[in-house]
Every structure is written in structure tokens, then in C-alpha cells.
Image: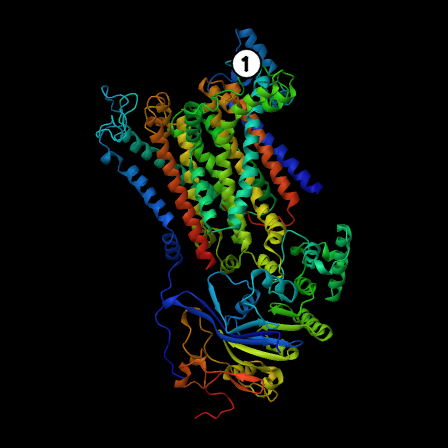
Amino acid sequence: MIQILTRYCTLLVLTLLVLAVMSFSLAYLFPGDTLENLTGLVPENEAQREALERQFKLDSSVVLQFFYYLGNLLVGDWGYSFTSGLPLLEEVGIALPATIELATYAMLMALFVGIPLGYYAGIRCYSTTDHILNSASMTTYSFPVFWFALLLILVFSLQLDAAPLSGRISLLYDVPRVTGFILVDVLLSDLDNKSLAFKDALSHIALPTFAIGAITTASLIRITRRSVIDVKHRPYIAAAVSRGLSSWQIFTRHILRNALLPILPLMAIQITTLITNAMIVETLFSWPGIGNWLIQAIYQRDYPALRIGMMAVSTLVITLTILVDLFNRIIDPSREKYEHAAV
Amino acid sequence: MPQFSLYEEEFHPSPWQRTWAAFRSSHIAMVGLVMLGCFVFFALFAPIITPYDATEQNIDGLLIPPSWTANGVISHLFGTDALGRDLFTRIIYGCRITLGTAFITVVLAMLVGVSLGTFAGMLRGVRSSIANHLLDALMAIPTLLIAIIIVAILGAGLLNSMWAITLALIPQFVHHTRSFVRAEMKKDYIVASKLDGANRWQLFVHSILPNMIETLVVQGTLALSIAVIDISALGFLNLGAQSPLPELGVILADGLDAAYLAPWNVAVPGTAIFLMVLSINIVGDGLRSALRKRVSH
Amino acid sequence: MPMLDIKNLTLEMGSGDNTIKALDKVNLSVSSGEIRALVGESGSGKSLIVSAICGALPGQWHLTADRMSWNGENLLGMSVYQRREVMRREIAVVFQNPQASLDPSSTLGEQLAESIPEEFVEGSWFWQRAQHRKKIAISTVHKVGIKHHKHYLSAYPHQIPADIGQKFMIAMALVSQPKLLIADDPTRGMEPTTKAQILKLFTRLNQTKSLSILFVSHDLLAIASMAHSMTVLYAGQTVESGKMKHIKKRPLHPYTQALLDSAPSFRKDLPPKSHLPTLGGSIPTLQHLPIGCRLGPRCPRAQRACVQKPAVRRIHDHSYSCHYPLHVEKQ
């Protein structure tokens, strides 16, 4: 057990180190001046430039530069953005929790709607309900996420006027930032009309979450259904039937656990796709998350922001993936014997 | 006891024929195949079937509605956009660019990914385990992020977005190839070939590759649908194909400005992407079911 | 009165022109307290009969039978619930591969405890019941000969050796105190020592608890030592059925004769370096089943009448279906 933990910790540290190296090298790869890319500060004259170079060790070897850079990263001194001039730590600190909130709600929706529906479709495989669910999930899964979001906007916001178009909360409410999660912040704050603010925030978050969550749900339905059908045809289910167990008992005791185990490794890929979709949808809904921020940064060629943004998002995704992998390893008794589930 | 054979000449279909027979028996899969065939036809013969040029602007006819509405004209089947360009032509060229680019991306990614994966699968020991874990972890970086970085380094454009998507698709191929090769290496027929004196290259080409082709095709269709969505997403965000190149995502983004006045500018390209991806998914699903049926019988 | 009585069981798949009759008018009966062996080569349909009795046939098979009754009640006419009750309490099945029949995600102890019927567990609070279940599990596991119960009951299926696995499957079958135990080739692929242990266990269970056993196999040596009566199956047709000692002394069907001949220990007067007789050819596939008596193409005594399926004839308890049985001189 300790062995597994140390192995995964070393893996995490190793991967983050590789990411840091890549992020550092981007300062050289991006067009423009290396110093400016690295720090975000534009020196005004020669003296300042030399001072900055000495400070960031640009006159010594690349390895020393990298270690200094690494030190800065760990401390929190991430440099400044070209466009806004604000420290990057602050900007990422605002933007990243917004995306995490959106992704979390979408993932929860997918887990709690997708997996039970997938089970249902799998148990009643090849029946009418199953065919309907299968077709619906296949159709939803084939939608490009940006078009789906556009359709939702066109229908719900513009035609029906049922949900607002952009932002996280109406400008009337001034919610102080505590955690960065708007729903939690509304509940934690002490505004007079808290329930109205909460409803407003909810209506803002509904469409983006649905746009992202629907596609992930469709994906999960298909994966779960396939896993359940595979498990149903295994010999130990037939042996359980021959022992006279009722179908409810077989479902809860045998199918439930065994169908869930092969799905877990695929969760990591779902998380990646989820975050990509979240980043795309954020631009359409003007949701102030890191996707929106990064895309504005690339339009304005804000290289320090890009560097740090890439580092932040990659760290998040890779940490999550490794955690999911670790979780799999711990709860699955016969990991090596298992093949990964197919879609 | 008479010595003649009582069994008549038997017809043993090859595995490919059995897969095709199982595929054909599903009606939905055949419909998907026909749809995909239409798109491929459009992609290949775009210059021949389109009435106009993709960038030809008709200043007199801006935002003409599609031909099935009251104000539409038949000469512009899907109407025109805000610059007077015929939408039907642009969609057909768009299919060509999107599908063609996606196809090239997938083929490139497959070549690189399969070679890397086979190499990693045939290795053994601590080296391979480190490489495997590292690759798995790096597989997790989102496509959009890679695209943004590459666009920042190399600039925007269709070619650069192709690099980005190829890079994003390679890890999947590597992962699947590696696990497949590792599983096959343990099987007895590989040991038999090794005992016969086959070296690694011969093992790969004669023993492992024929068995791998089927999973590769299924993986390829999956990757193709992802590639189509990603290319159009990047085009939509103006990070990939640039206007006036008629890529489906770019057409969608162009139509967004006039979306309220002329919704067909948004609906038609979006439907085109949706149908393309749907047909690829249906064909992929049908292939997977056919392979499963063949294996289980 | 036999406990399990099957008469003219037919199992077919497909329709119209392409009907495949995997089982063609099979007769089988097991009386109380006896060990009946069901013998046949691979491909003769033995496992299909077991699935048919359990009610676990895949959907594409159609089953028809003149009589298929358990203790006088018609199995085919029962509702799903009643059938399941019969399977739960009175019939138990042990399958071929013990590791494939166990759920890989839970320990052996859990699986054994969940198979114990509610009626046997005493206690009114759930922890009392859980404790009693554990006690019953441990005692059953001892009965089949697994000594270190603590180690094995907390292990997962992929961690135990094959013989312990099979003994555990027998324990799982016994825990509901059935009246009939169906063993579908339980000793396949086992080494002789473990095979002998399992077979001794079966004999002991039959003698002490008067448990009837339907032992499906193609291992004649094992069967000869254990079984009281035997039914021989060839390509989905029963060819001979009767008491073991009668069949050994005087087989009436050419196939049975060939089977017994091919096992050297049955022949007492075997000179050294003598030719071991076999039946030429191999068992026909489902797509190419011969009409009439399915042994026809391979049988050394076949003649024109064999294209019609022979009727079942009896001499006391010994029934056979052959146009030219061995006790009738060949023309």
C-alpha cells in the first residue's frame, strides 16, 4: 500500500517536473523577447533590462535559469500579464475556480444521470427502452459542443428568454469572493436577498452546465451500458442464476460492482474531454473561466499568460488523472487481471 | 462402411467477410455507411459538383434565405451569407476541408502512435514501465491546450491546427497499441513464432499486425470523429483555419454575427458537422458490434 | 419414482429449413440416492442438457419435451419464481471452471454467505444472522475438506488454486442442502491426485447424505469407479442407458462398446503391443448432423435401416436405441 502511494507520488512529481520544463521552454519558443515572455515585464531602458536579466539569471546557464524559474513557480511569483498588467497568480486564481465549478457540476450531472441510465439500458439490453437510450446517447454524443451550446443559447436565451446569456451572476449583486465558486459564495455571503441571488446564479450556470454535461452524460451512458452487457454474459452470473438468486440480488451484489470497475480507468479521459469542452463553452457564454481567459490571451498574444495558463490547466488535469488512477488501484482487488473496458 | 464423403463442399468465409456480413445485417450501420459515403463523395468531387466558387461574392444577393423558404431562390440552394457567398458551395468545400484534414490527421497519428506503441509494448522492464506511466499521464493534456500552445508558437492556420490535433491523438493510439501488443506477446502463437526463429520485426509484421488491424480500424473511426469535432472547434475559435477558407467551423463562426437575422448561416454548417460526426460514429459502432459478433460466434 | 425425469427432450435452434436439433429426443432420469453418469464426447450436448435443467438456456433455443419433471412437478409448466425456488433449494450445479464461476470482485466468504438460504439462518438481529451465516459457511467448508478456512474464506477468486476452488464450488452447492447435485465436468483439466480427492468427496456425500448426483463427463475411468448408472449420449441422442454393472458386462450399443474398448482398463485380456480399437471419424458438427441415427456414418454395424431413428427398447432397466444392437447377430 505504501509502495503504491510512493510510486504514484513520484509519478506525480516527475510529470509536474516535465510540465515545468515544457512551460519554461515556451518562454524561448514563443516569438518575441525571452525576457518579456518569462516575466511579463517590459523593460524601459537598458539599465532596467540588465537588472532584470541579472535577477532572473538570464545571463547564466539555462539550467540555473530553470531552477530559479521553478523556485518562482513554487513561491507564487508567476509574473505579470501583457494585456492587463496584473499579477498572473491573481488572474489565474480568479479564472481557474470558475472553470472548476463548471466542470464539477457537469461531472456530477454526468455521474448521477449517466451511470444509472447506462445500467438501466444495459440490464434491459436489446429492448425498446435500450434502443431509445442508445440512439439518444449516440446522437447527443455526436453533437459538436459549440454548436450544441449555440443551439441552447438560440432556443433558451433568445427565443424563450428563459436563461441569461453571459456571465456568472447579474451585475446587480455584488458577491464577495471567498472560494471562487459562485454558488458557494452566494450561500456564504450575507446579502439581504440571498435566495434571489442564488436563483440568479443558478440560472446563469444552468445552460453552460447542461451543454457540457449532456455530452459527457451520453458518453458515460454508452460506456456503462457496454460494461453491463459484458458482465451480464459472464459465466459467474450464470452460476449465480443457477444458485437461484433473484435478479435484484444478482444486480446489486454482482453486476453493480463488476460493471463499475472497468469504467473507472476511462473516467480520466472523460475528465480531459470535459475540461476541453468547458473551455470552448466558456467563450460562448462569456463565463469568466480559464478557457475564456486563455483564448483571449491567445488572441492578444499574451505570452506569459499562456505559459502560466498552460501550466495551471495541465497541472490540474494531470493531478486529477493520477488521483483517479490511484483510486482505481486501491479499490480494485485484481488490477492486473483486468482489461480495460471498451466503448 | 462406404468410404465417400457425406459432407458437401463447405464455404468458409474469411474473418473479413464475416465481419462485413455482420455489419451488413444492421440497417442503421448501413445507413451510416451511406451517409459517410455521401460525405466522402462530396469531399473528393467538390470542385465538380459545386455551382459557384467558394469565395465568389455576389454583392447583390446578401443573406438570401435557403431555397425551401418563401424568399429563397433555387440557384442558391442553402442561401447566401453576409458577404454574398453561396452557402451550398461553401458547405461542400467545407466538408472537403474538414473531413480531409481530419483524415490526414488520423492517418499521421495512427502511424506515429502505432510505431511508438509497438516499440513500447515490445520493451520490457523498468524502462517500459516508467515510459508507460509517463505517457499515460501526458495523455491527459486537453486538445485545446495543445492547440493554443502550437498556435502561439507557430501562428494560426489550418496546418498548425493539424499538428496540434495530431499531437493530441497520438497518445490514444500509443496507449491502445501498447496494451494490445503486451497482451499478444504473452500468447502462445508468438512464442511459437519466436521458437521458429522470427526476429522482432518479423513478429510484428506477420503475427501481431494482422490481428491488430481490426482494433486499429475501430480506434481510427473513434479518432476520426474526435478529429472532425476538434478541427471544426479550432476553426470556430479562429485558431485553426482562418477565414475566408471555407472550413465548417469557420463558416459557423462567420455566420454567428448575423445569426439573429439569418439563422440558416448557423444551422446549416452546424448540421453538416453534426451529420458527419454522427455517420462516423454510427459506422464505428456498427464495426465494433460486427467484430464482437464475429468473435463471439 | 425417479426424482428428475426427462423424456424426449428436444432442443432446436433456427426455423423452417435451417433448424438445428442440438438435442434430439433425449431421455434421462435420476432416482433418489443414486449417482448417474452422463457420458459423451465434447460436442454431444451434455452442457446443453445441464443448462436446460437449470433454466439458463440462451434465448435462441426452443425447448420441447414430453416430460420434464422434478419430483413429479412439471418443470416447464412452473412459473419463473417456482423454477427459481427449485433451483435455489433442491437442485445445485457445479460447473467446469471454478474460477470462472466466481465473482472476481468479492471474497469467497462473502459469496458463500450470500448463498445460504434464509431459512437456515437463526437469529433475529442482523449481526446475529451474519455470525450464524459465517458459522454455517465455516462448517460447510470443513465438510468438503478445506482445512485453513480463515485464509481461504478471505481470499479473492484469483488467489486460490484450482482444487480448492472446485471444492469451494461444491461447498457453495451443498450449503442449500439440495437433493440433486449436477456436476458438469468438475474434474476437467485436474491432476489425478486432486481429481481423486474430488471424486472421493462426491462418493462420500452420496453415501452419507444420500445426495443424488448427476455426473456429466467423458472420463470413463472416473465414472466406472463411482457411478451407479450411466446414460450414454452421442451427438444429442441418447444411445444407451442403464445400470453400470450391466453396461460394463454387456454393452448393447456399438458406440458404448467402442467407448469401453477405448479405455484399456476395461479390458482384462489385453495382450502386450495389441491394437487399441477406436471408432473412425469424429463427432459431426451442428451444421452437418446425419439423419436418423447420428452414429450412422461411423458405426461398423450400420446398414440401410439406420437412416431412420431407432426406437427406444428396454431389457429390464437397460434401455438402448439401435437397429442392430450387439446382442442380435449381424445379418
Q: Position of residue C222 (x, y in %)?
A: 63, 76
Report the colour scheme.
rainbow
Which of C242 and C232 lies nearest the eye of the viewer? C242
Q: Which chain contains the residue that carries disc 1?
A: A
Q: How many marks?
A: 1
Kindly tell me whether residue A93 is visible in this rendering.
Answer: yes
Q: Is residue B62 above or below residue C74?
A: above
Q: Residue at x 46, y 17 (%)?
A: A300
Q: Is residue B157 left or right of residue A39?
A: left
Q: Position of residue C327 (x, y in %)?
A: 52, 91
Q: Residue at x 29, y 38 (%)?
A: B42
Q: Is residue B123 above or below residue B42?
A: below
Q: Image quadrant for the N terminus of chain C?
A: bottom right
Kindly tell me whether residue A276 is visible in this rendering.
Answer: no
Q: Quadrant of residue C215?
A: bottom right
Q: Quadrant of residue C214?
A: bottom right
Q: Image quadrant for the C terminus of chain C?
A: bottom left
Q: Position of residue C174 (x, y in %)?
A: 69, 65
Q: Quadrant of residue C162?
A: bottom right
Q: Is residue C280 left or right of residue C97?
A: left
Q: Secondary structure at mark 1?
A: loop
Q: Is residue B210 above or below residue C22?
A: above
- The residue carrying mark 1 is A172
Amino acid at dot 1: Leu
Q: Residue at x 33, y 31 (%)?
A: B268
Q: Position of residue B152 (x, y in %)?
A: 46, 23
Q: Is residue A222 left or right of residue C222?
A: left
User: Is the residue marked by circle 1 packed among few (<14), some (14-19), or many (20+) residues within 10 Å?
Assistant: few
